[in-house]
Amino acid sequence: MIEEKDKENYNLIEMIKGNEKRLQHLEDDITAIRKYIRWQRFFGAVKFIVIIVPVVIGFIYLPPLIKEFVDAYLPFLEGK
């Protein structure tokens, strides 16, 4: 009877140790995933800035330049 309980306790302890190892492995994987997601967010923001900033600057500066260009070449295009 005592031997049975000892075997059972030993089996439970071994299962707990195995679960602790698996849990540590999962925690390491989750940490790596969190780092990956953090870098993805950072580079996503960088991509957004690289795309949006030139577009906004273009909307601000291009209309006057286009108007100057059209005004300069309009007489040639009209044939006068």
Image (spheres, rainbow, N blue to C red):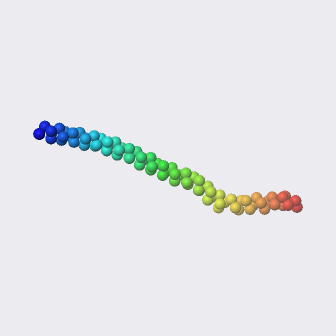
Circle count: 0
Query: Looking at the image, which residue sits at the far front?
Result: 1
In-image side of 44 versus 61 (left or right): left
- Closest to the observer: 49 or 7? 7
Report which quarter residue 10 is drawn in. Answer: top left
Q: Which residue occupies 21% across, 39% down?
A: 11
Q: Which residue occupies 48% across, 49% down?
A: 40
Residue 33: percent from left, percent from top: 42, 46
Q: Which residue occupies 85% across, 61% down?
A: 78
In-image side of 55 versus 30 (left or right): right
Residue 28: percent from left, percent from top: 36, 44
Rendered-image quadrant of the N terminus: top left
Query: Looking at the image, which residue sits at the far right?
Result: 80
In-image side of 68 versus 42 (left or right): right
- Closest to the observer: 7 or 79? 7
- Closest to the observer: 80 or 16? 16
Residue 2: percent from left, percent from top: 11, 39
Is 9 placed above or below 45 here? Answer: above
In-image side of 6 versus 67 (left or right): left
Residue 14: percent from left, percent from top: 23, 39
Rendered-image quadrant of the C terminus: bottom right
